[in-house]
Amino acid sequence: MALLTDNISIKTIIGLGSAISGDVHADGFIRVEGDVDGNLESTGHVDIGREARINGNITAQSVVLGGIVLGDIYAPNQIKLLSSSAVIGNIFTRNLEIEENVIFHGHCIALKKEEDFNQASERFSNELSIRSKAV
């Protein structure tokens, strides 16, 4: 299945050997080969290379992950985890594809129907909020 993206032109590149400390917000397609210590947010697609490391949450329309993410991934259209990827965090999507040998430690909400997905995501977020305040 092809990724659902509104724009196939890469608008932002974080190159191999680059390191960013802080949140990244960008419109459209983002390609990450380096390291990001902060949240990553895009209005379009995010493609994370095999050598990339993200220490923060990712929010986009779709995500292909080849590297490591320590944080949650929210991409309602699609998330694809390549065999070289690792996620320590939660995944929220309506379409999930996971290759063999992926490391994933967290919770996953992957419901096709938009209404079911939105309700489950909201319930889980509320539950996490309650748990964090109870500690």
Image (cartoon, helix red, strand yellow):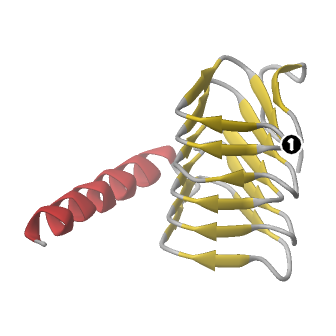
Number of disc labels? 1
Would residue 59 be found to the left or right of residue 98 on screen? left
Q: Position of residue 129 (x, y in %)?
A: 21, 57
Q: Position of residue 2 (x, y in %)?
A: 89, 44
User: Which element is circle 1 on?
Assistant: loop
Q: Position of residue 77 (x, y in %)?
A: 66, 42
Dot 1 alpha-carbon crowd within 10 angstroms: few under 14, some 14 to 19, many 20 or more: few
Residue 55, placed above or below residue 86: above
Q: Quadrant of residue 4?
A: top right
Question: Of residues 48 and 118, which is closer to you in this image?
Answer: 48
Question: Of residues 1 and 54, which is closer to you in this image?
Answer: 54
Would residue 29 be found to the left or right of residue 70 on screen? right
Q: Position of residue 16 (x, y in %)?
A: 89, 42
Residue pictured at 85% horizontal, 73% vertical: 99
Residue pictured at 85% horizontal, 43% vertical: 33
Residue 9, placed above or below residue 120: above
Residue pictured at 58% horizontal, 55% vertical: 112
Question: Of residues 76 and 40, which is closer to you in this image?
Answer: 40
Residue found farthest to the left? 134
Residue found farthest to the bottom? 101
For disc 1, the marked residue is 17
Amino acid at circle 1: Gly
Residue pictured at 86% horizontal, 56% vertical: 51
Q: Quadrant of residue 46?
A: top right
Q: For the C terminus, give its image quadrant.
A: bottom left
